[in-house]
Amino acid sequence: EIAMTQSPATLSVSPGERATLSCRASQSVSSNLAWYQQKPGQAPRLLVYGASTRATGVSARFSGSGSGTEFTLTISSLQSEDFAVYYCQQYNNWPPYTFGQGTKLEIK
Amino acid sequence: EVQLVESGGGLVQPGGSLRLSCTASGFTFSIYSMNWVRQAPGKGLEWLSYISSAGGVTIYYADSVKGRFTISRDDADNSLYLQMNSLRAEDTAVYYCARGVGYCSGGSCHNWFDPWGQGTLVTVSS
């Protein structure tokens, strides 16, 4: 089973600034990595798949990068609606599909 | 609009059973694989089960639910199900259904999840 580790657990950033979230896989997952955003009381929403391809309708402020075991989600110029919990998920070696434990992005 | 709507959650005693449903609309349900994912209160996401497209010949479960939960689908009714037996307190969570979207290459398929339903809460307590 591939373990996904996200860092930091909580990230405090001011509106208008840039946020960088990290996700590490215990072994290579190639580019088979997705990012999801979850707001309180809502279902997760797909942001990025294939490590760097934005999902339909996702703002260009969101960008994903990386391959193998190291991945990054960057959110430029944070807006109020961006403060949420973000999860990475590998879909390279499954079952099981595995998620990171999440990074909570909060307002500084 | 592509949409998934779960139902069937509620309060159940330890050792009891519950059947969750997920109704799909806005897309051709039969050609997509489907999944169940849960989220315990204040915790992260845990994948539970996968069923392949077109009748669901291929099924997988997480070790945490293997032997207790059963996934199924009715393509004629655009519906996904999760039969949950021998429920435990640690099964308390919001349960989401999610469509698998992706590609197949070299004999392997790689799917991310999009969209997700709004979730249904299952509480296991006496």
Image: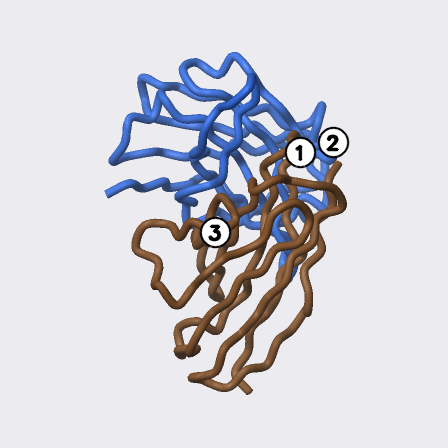
Circle 2 is placed at which residue position?
A: B63
Name the quarter where the N terminus of chain B is drawn.
top left
Circle 3 is placed at which residue position?
A: A52
| Real-space Cα separation, disc 2 to disc 1, in angstroms | 9 Å
- Side (left or right) of B108 relative to B124: left
Q: Could you tell me which residue is drawn at 35 percent across and 21 percent down?
A: B30
Residue A10: give x, y in percent of width and height. Answer: 65, 73
User: What colouring method underlies this structural image?
Assistant: by chain
Q: Mark 2 Cα within 10 Å, few/some/many (few <14, many 20+)?
A: few
Whether callout 2 and callout 3 share a subunit is answered no
Relative vertical location of residue A61 with respect to residue B102 in this rendering, above or below: below
Q: Nearer the viewer, residue B64 or A36?
A: A36
Q: Nearer the viewer, residue A21 or A30?
A: A30
Q: Nearer the viewer, residue A16 or B67?
A: A16
Q: Amino acid at mark 2?
A: Asp
Q: Chain of mark 2?
A: B
Q: Amino acid at mark 3?
A: Ser
- Side (left or right) of A5 relative to B81: right
Would residue B123 be visible to someone looking at this image? no
Would residue A101 be visible to someone looking at this image? yes
Q: Could you tell me which residue is drawn at 52 percent across and 12 percent down?
A: B57
Residue A84: give x, y in percent of width and height. Answer: 50, 69
Question: What is the secondary structure assignment of the residue under circle 1?
Answer: loop
Q: Quadrant of residue A13?
A: bottom right
Circle 1 is placed at which residue position?
A: A96
Residue B41: give x, y in percent of width and height. Answer: 63, 58
Q: Chain of mark 1?
A: A
Q: Which chain is blue?
A: B
Q: Earlier in the sequence, mark 1 or mark 3?
A: 3
State if disc 1 and disc 2 touch (CB < 8 Å): yes
Q: Which chain is brown?
A: A
Question: What is the secondary structure assignment of the residue under circle 3?
Answer: loop
